Image: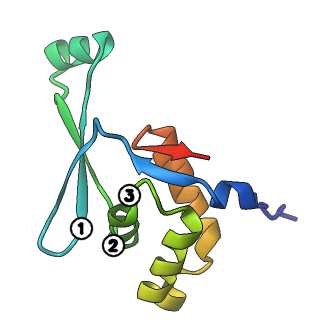
């Protein structure tokens, strides 16, 4: 039997802010692409000897792109979830579980900075 994950209400009250070091673009369909510069000693070696790119591109899906554009450093995850629910409806459910996972992933890659 699988354990059901419990999401802390405190986490949903966190306010995400975009990392100012991350550049991003939006195409004509509204899909967001994050441009991640590969810095650091080991990345320089990988670029030189293994032909790794200096910039990596992360393409977000439709839901992720919509949520990314709502990140302004003032809205909390609950407010973003309300806008996502209004726009996507039932297609976004289970809403807050998915948003919590999405923002934890963005935070783990340092694409966003969470303010408590």
Verify CB contact (< 8 Å) between mark 1 and mark 2.
yes
Q: Quadrant of residue 111?
A: top left
Residue displayed at 62% across by 77% down: 94
Query: Gap in Å between the C-alphas at discs 2 and 3?
Result: 18 Å
Secondary structure of residue under mark 1: loop
* Residue toward you, 49 or 25: 25
Q: How is the image coloured?
A: rainbow
Vertical order, 35 against 66 (above or below): above
* Residue toward you, 111 or 20: 20
From the top left corner, tell me how far across and down residue 39 is, in percent.
26, 21
Q: In terms of sequence position, does the residue under pointer 1 or pointer 3 come before the other?
A: 1
Q: In terms of sequence position, does the residue under pointer 1 or pointer 2 come before the other?
A: 1
Mark 2 is surrounded, within 10 Å at the Cα level, by few (under 14), some (14 to 19) or many (20 or more) other residues, namely some
Residue under pointer 1: 31
Vertical order, 34 against 63 (above or below): above
Q: As drawn, is 26 to the left or to the right of 77? A: left
Q: Which mark is residue 72?
A: 3
Query: Which residue lies most toward the front here?
Result: 74
Mark 3 is surrounded, within 10 Å at the Cα level, by few (under 14), some (14 to 19) or many (20 or more) other residues, namely few
Query: Gap in Å between the C-alphas at discs 1 and 3?
Result: 17 Å
Query: Gap in Å between the C-alphas at discs 1 and 2?
Result: 6 Å
Q: Which quadrant does the N terminus fall into? A: bottom right
Secondary structure of residue under mark 3: loop
From the top left corner, tell me how far across and down residue 72 is, in percent.
38, 58
Residue displayed at 44% across by 37% down: 110
Mark 1 is surrounded, within 10 Å at the Cα level, by few (under 14), some (14 to 19) or many (20 or more) other residues, namely some
* Residue toward you, 20 or 108: 20
From the top left corner, tell me how far across and down residue 96 is, in percent.
62, 70
Q: Nearer the viewer, mark 2 or mark 3?
A: 3
Verify CB contact (< 8 Å) between mark 2 and mark 3.
no
Residue under pointer 2: 62
């Amino acid at each position: 039997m699988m354990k059901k994950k419990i999401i802390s209400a405190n986490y949903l009250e966190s306010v995400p802010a975009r990392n100012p070091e991350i550049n991003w673009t939006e195409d004509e369909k509204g899909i967001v692409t994050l441009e991640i510069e590969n810095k650091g000693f080991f990345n320089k070696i990988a670029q030189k000897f293994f032909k790794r790119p200096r910039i990596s591109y992360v393409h977000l899906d439709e839901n992720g792109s919509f949520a990314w554009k709502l990140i302004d450093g003032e809205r909390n995850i609950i407010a973003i979830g309300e806008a996502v629910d209004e726009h996507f409806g039932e297609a976004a459910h289970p809403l807050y579980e998915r948003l919590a996972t999405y923002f934890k992933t963005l935070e783990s890659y340092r694409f966003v900075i969470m303010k408590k």
